Image (spheres, grey):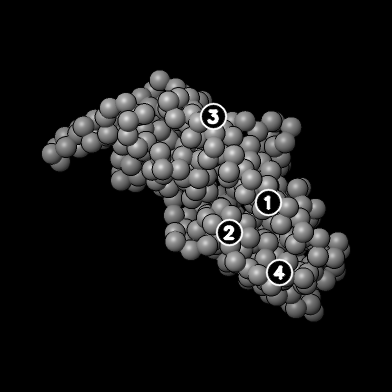
Amino acid sequence: MMVVSPMYGPLPGSPGRITRRRLIASLAALPAAAALGGCSLVSDRPTGPLADRIIGAAATTGMVGDLVANVGGARVESDALMGAGVDPHLFKPSERTLRRMERADIVFYNGLHLEAGLAYVLEQMEERQPVAAITRLIPEDLLLTPAEFEGNPDPHIWFDVRLWILACAAVRDTLRELDPANAATYDANAAAYTAELEALDAWVREQIATIPAERRVLITAHDAFGYFGQSYGFEVLGIQGANTAAEAGARDIQRLADLIAERRIPAIFVESSVPRRTVEALREAVQSRGFDVRIGGQLYSDAMGDAGTPEGTYLGMVRANVTLITAALSGQAPADQETTE
């Protein structure tokens, strides 16, 4: 069996999180529970050579699921476990989620501690089915290590399209190893999607270039956009750290309010997967200093948009974010905002 080790360290226990014991117990109970319900997970999972049937792939986030769908094409059915607006830092697997993972031929995940609540589940599943991190080909020297992560890397690599190209290669290589008879198909699909990603990266750079350099300051609910800032020339500031499990304090808000008022930054942004209350509190703090910063809109950060919408794809999510940022920071927003599918 092919196994790609998860990129996780020890998961600290904390109130409100699912414990290691509970997760392991849930996994162990699945076959028995299924049998009592009149079916077994073993028989429920498709059988037969992978080359002769569609491969079932579970994916943690929508971004991972979209990537797997593009590389797998008609050969792979990609099932994203986390939908629009779901924060992967805080995601807790239900029994239904565990069943969907158990039924899959392979489980893809982001890694780098993003899916903290699934860490022990993935560790247990490694023993019985293929599990693969899409970040496994990214060199360590390209990973950011924010202080908030205590030396661990920032997992939000999808905000740098060039890093997402490396993730695409990881999915391609994993599927080739899992299903070597159809390796040529995965090579062709990955090459075609890589070309789209390269075009997207060029488009992002063109749009960002229209924003005056002194206004390229991106302030959001949490530090998810570090790779975006590093790759596209932005100063990125979050009200709270890169992990939404950490709460923003009054001191963080006051510090950012001083900076915004002093530098007269025109807009701050909310995020689709993070409550907006901290951003609204920041705006009120800035207003108390005599400067009216506006909320520039809602960015897609740890989750894509609704399925079936342009923003429900990685390409559309990136385009929507860049269009919004460009307009809000008084750059020249593109007239054509249609998303490439």
Element marked by disc 1: helix
Q: Is residue 173 left or right of residue 199?
A: left
Q: Is residue 149 left or right of residue 124?
A: right
Residue extending farthest to the top is 1
Q: State the CA–CA distance, disc 3 to disc 4.
A: 36 Å
Q: Is residue 318 left or right of residue 79?
A: right
Residue drawn at (40%, 38%), measured in percent from left and top? 75
The three-letter amino acid code for the residue at tag 1 is: Ala
Residue indicated by mark 3: 173
Q: Is residue 253 visible in the rendered structure shown here?
A: no
Q: Measured along the vertical axis of the image, is residue 205 above or below residue 64? A: below
Residue indicated by mark 1: 199
For marks 4 and 2, the one nearer the N-term is 4
Residue indicated by mark 4: 334
Q: Is residue 290 visible in the rendered structure shown here?
A: yes
List x then y, in percent, for residue 17: 44, 44
- Is the residue under label 4 in contact with that under label 3 (CB below 8 Å)? no
Q: State the CA–CA distance, disc 3 to disc 1.
A: 22 Å
Element marked by disc 3: helix
